[in-house]
Image (cartoon, rainbow, N blue to C red):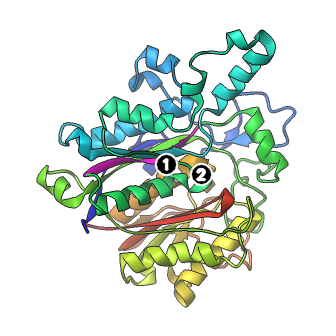
Amino acid sequence: MRRVVITGLGAITPVGCDVDTFWNSLKNGKNGIDFVTKFDTTELKAKLAAEVKDFDPLLYMDKSEVRKTDKFVQYAVAAASQAVTDSGIAENIAPERFGVYYGSGIGGFDTFIAEQNNMINRGPARVSPLFIPKMIMNMGAGNIAIKFGAKGPCVAVSTACATGTTAIGEAYRAIKGGYADAIIAGGVEASLNPLAMAGFINCMALTESTDKDCASVPFDKRRSGFVMGEGAGALIVEDYEHAVKRGAKIYAEVKGYGSTCDAFHVTAPDSSAEASGRAISDCLKEAGEFAPEKIYINAHGTSTPLNDKTETQAIKNAFGDGAYSVNISSTKSMTGHLLGAAGAIEGIAAILALRENIVPPTIGYKEADGECDLNYTPNVAKNTELELAMSVSLGFGGHNACVGFTKI
């Protein structure tokens, strides 16, 4: 089996539209959550979101491409473009050995709404011929492959909020098994609209807080639901020997991956955390043994009552008494929940934490909860020597994924 490394990163987020800005924001505890500006929330109980700001798709696509694509594709192509440029991979790989494992939880939600309105108000003849290719979820992966001539495996991943982590993990396995030399992996979401918010509100998933500084408070006793976010993350996952041969910059080595399902409920996590804990422990077994105090977990940490309690139990199931020594934080306290993009963005955060020996904080943390009693790095980043960084994602449908990175 081949060794697998990360050689490029790209990020479009509520706290920065490039990797450096994103990472500096996390280290400094910058909050990307505020009142929604994209539409009127008068009739919605939830008023806050983590919107991407100052994004210009024309930096990555020409005008005709922008016109023909939903925003989720624009975010995906932008993040992938940053990662490809960062890695220098495009000119240094055979097209048939270059793949894409990229997904979204929802796909072109805005396009779906716009064309449904066209159908109702103007009739079927006025539905755009671009409706289907703008909407369907695989078009993030498809457009990335087209842009960079990636003719190897192209897989559109959708495991709800675990999508980004699943994409990275499955790309790792594909390269480890010899099916590609490099893969653009990650996830995207651009579904901030009234319909999506109403759906999450009515299934009691979103916070109704109007205080942006304590709306997304993972592991805090006051947590009351997640804050919707949007954005995209992309990573170049590459065979180690291939990367060394071309003189690539290497951020980290991918050392482990765990993927399980609760098989329990469509939205609620299994409170025993058996399967979610096993995703973490499977990743750990593959990665090797590390002192708990030298491990960082970028937790799923959504700020919902059930997720944070269950995830705490999952970490305890995986680490036993060592769980209390592990460095943990939830960057969703700053970015909100990026849904299908969350795992990709948080994988990048985990890699950069490992690279710089800095644990980003869980901001807004004030009130401890007896059911969430681990070290969540409250409010201020921590400098500490790290040897393993893990990113955990837990999605609707019971999807659990964990990916682990080490220094090279």
**Which structural element holds mark 1?**
helix
Using the image as rendered, state which of residue 58 and residue 186 is in the foreground. Answer: 186
Compared to residue 223, the image places residue 128 above or below, namely: above
Q: Is residue 68 above or below residue 316?
A: above
Q: Residue furthest right?
A: 43
Give the class, few, some or many, for how many residues have Cα within 10 Å of label 1's Cα (few <14, many ≥20). Answer: some
- Pick the residue in front: 37 or 256: 256
- Can you say whether 57 is above or below 345 in the image? above
Magenta: main secondary structure equals strand
Q: Residue at x 25, y 42 (%)?
A: 96
**Residue 384 seen by the camera:** yes
Q: Which residues are magenta?
A: 181-189
Q: Quadrant of the C terminus?
A: bottom left
Q: Which residue is mark 2?
A: 334
- Residue drawn 82% across the image and 53% down it: 204
Q: Residue at x 51, y 83 (%)?
A: 325
Q: Amino acid at mark 2?
A: Met
* First in sequence: mark 1 vs mark 2: 1
> Residue drawn at (44%, 77%), measured in percent from left and top?
284
280 in the magenta segment:
no
Which of the pair 4/30 is nearer the observer? 4
Contact between marks 1 and 2 (CB within 8 A): the answer is yes
* Left or right position of 276 against 171: right
Asked if residue 117 lies left or right of residue 141, the reply is right
Q: Secondary structure at mark 2?
A: helix
Residue linked to disc 1: 25
